[in-house]
Each structure stands twice: as structure tokens, then as C-alpha cells.
């Protein structure tokens, strides 16, 4: 899935954050894939958002791999109304909370290069990235909106399952929230996904069977 919006009276979502695989500069093998891309976004009253991404990546049984590169765009909007997000990485771990080594660079985006260059990885590995984004909410006259790219369209491997859960502040009201999602290549408006408002504070989005370079 690509882009997502969330709001006081609008809750829209789509999956796409640029999440690229890194090992060696070669095309991904036929056995490589993302088994699951699961994201939790918690919207706070101060308009900041805590994001927890859990990516289960299958490198396959062979090849020279050391980890992944995660690129998070920080510039949103048009030239006339462009917003630069303020992002703070809190942790990068495995599924058991064990820290994973990473480097943090980038301008106009954040690039997290996760993995040990001296250690090769094969088969399935899980990466859990936790960060906080300030100024993530856009306010309009009659609603607030969170526009968020979740899985990205830069993956050279397919994504079996992508899921995102958005939790709004306590003051949110189910009656004034709505949700939608988009899938496909960059700029696609396809809707091969589900978007459901579960209750006053929670919306759930899901897509399956995404091809390479789709989100």
C-alpha cells in the first residue's frame, strides 16, 4: 500500500514509505521477498506521531546480504505548501528487542542502513524501527489529516502482506472519521486494499500480494 491519511474527520491511508533493500548492488534474487510489513502509527494530541515498523525480510538461502536500507522521506506537499518533517529515531532492533547496528544519514529524507557489514544474513530476519515524527498532521478548516507513506514503492522484491494500524488520540470520534487506502506503483490510485475504521480511535489497513516496486 502507498499513501495514508488520518484525521479528526478524515482518516485516509495508503502504503508507501521508501523502503529499499540493501546487500550488494545487484538485482534481488527470485527467492527474496518481504514476508510481512507491519506498521503501528500512534497519533498524539501535540500532532506528533510515533511509528513502529516491523519488517520480516526473507533474503533466501544464498547470496551476499548484510541487511537493509530504509529511506524515510521528510518532504511532503507541493512547492507552494511543502512541509519538512522532524524525525527522531528511537531504536532499531530485532523482534526480541536486541539492538541492530545501523547508520543514519540523508538530506530531505532519512536513510537508515541497518546491518553489520562484517556479518552476512540469510533466510528470514525481522527489523523493528521505532521513531517519532513531529508536524505530521495537516490541519484543514473542518478536519485534520495524516498523510503517510508506509511501505514504499522502491522495493525490488514482492511484499506478501502489508498491514498498518493507526491509533488516534482519545478525543477522536468514530462518527467523524473515515478511512481509505491506495496501492500500486508510484502515483497509482488503485485500491487493492482494505481500510476499516474499527472504533473511535483505531483504523486498520491491509494489502496482500504486492509486486516488486508496488506499495
Image (tube, grey):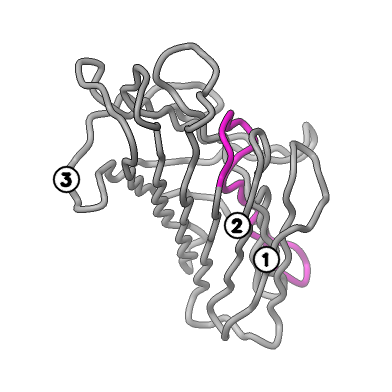
Q: Is residue 97 left or right of residue 171?
A: left
The Cα–Cα distance between marks 1 and 2, rounded to whole angstroms, is 7 Å
> Do the residues bearing badges 1 and 2 touch, measured as CB atoms within 8 Å?
yes
Q: Which residue in the protein does label 2 denote? A: 137
Q: Whole-percent x and y of residue 165?
A: 51, 66
Q: Quadrant of the C terminus?
A: top right
Residue lying at 51% horizontally and 13% vertically, measured from the top left: 26
| SS at mark 2 in the image | strand
Residue lying at 54% horizontally and 29% vertically, measured from the top left: 30
Marks 1 and 3, the one that precedes in the sequence: 3
Residue 122 on the magenta span:
no
The residue mark sitting in front, 2 or 3, is 3
Residue lying at 71% horizontally and 82% vertically, measured from the top left: 176
Marks 1 and 2, the one that precedes in the sequence: 2
Boundaries of the magenta span = 137-159
- Residue sticking out furthest to the left: 98
88, above or below 167, in the image: above
191, above or below 98, in the image: below
| SS at mark 3 in the image | loop
The quadrant in which residue 158 appears is: top right
Q: Whole-percent x and y of residue 16?
A: 62, 44
Badge number at residue 200: none
Choose between 146 and 123: the one closer to the eye.
123
Tell me the crowding category of disc 1: few under 14, some 14 to 19, or many 20 or more residues within 10 angstroms, Cα based: some
Q: Which residue in the protein does label 1 denote? A: 144
Amino acid at each position: 500500500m502507498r499513501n495514508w491519511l488520518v484525521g479528526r474527520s478524515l482518516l485516509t491511508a495508503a502504503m508507501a514509505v521508501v523502503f529499499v533493500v540493501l546487500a550488494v548492488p545487484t538485482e534481488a534474487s527470485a527467492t527474496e521477498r518481504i514476508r510481512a510489513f507491519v506498521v503501528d502509527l500512534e497519533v498524539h494530541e501535540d500532532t506528533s506521531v510515533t511509528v513502529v515498523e516491523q519488517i520480516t525480510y526473507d533474503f533466501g538461502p544464498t547470496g551476499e546480504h548484510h541487511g537493509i536500507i530504509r529511506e524515510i522521506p521528510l518532504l511532503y506537499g507541493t512547492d507552494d505548501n511543502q512541509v519538512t518533517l522532524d524525525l527522531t529515531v528511537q531504536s532499531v532492533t530485532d523482534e526480541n528487542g536486541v539492538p541492530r547496528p545501523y547508520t543514519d544519514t540523508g538530506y530531505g529524507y532519512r536513510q537508515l542502513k541497518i546491518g553489520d557489514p562484517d556479518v552476512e544474513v540469510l533466510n528470514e530476519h525481522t527489523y523493528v524501527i521505532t521513531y517519532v515524527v513531529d508536524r505530521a498532521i495537516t490541519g484543514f478548516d473542518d478536519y485534520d489529516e495524516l498523510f503517510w507513506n508506509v511501505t514504499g514503492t522502491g522495493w525490488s522484491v514482492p511484499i506478501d502482506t502489508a498491514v498498518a494500524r493507526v491509533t488516534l488520540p482519545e478525543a477522536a470520534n468514530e462518527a467523524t472519521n473515515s478511512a481509505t487506502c491506495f496501492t500500486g506503483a508510484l502515483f497509482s490510485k488503485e485500491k487493492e486494499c482494505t481500510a476499516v475504521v474499527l472504533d473511535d480511535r483505531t483504523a486498520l489497513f491491509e494489502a496482500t500480494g504486492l509486486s516488486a516496486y508496488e506499495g
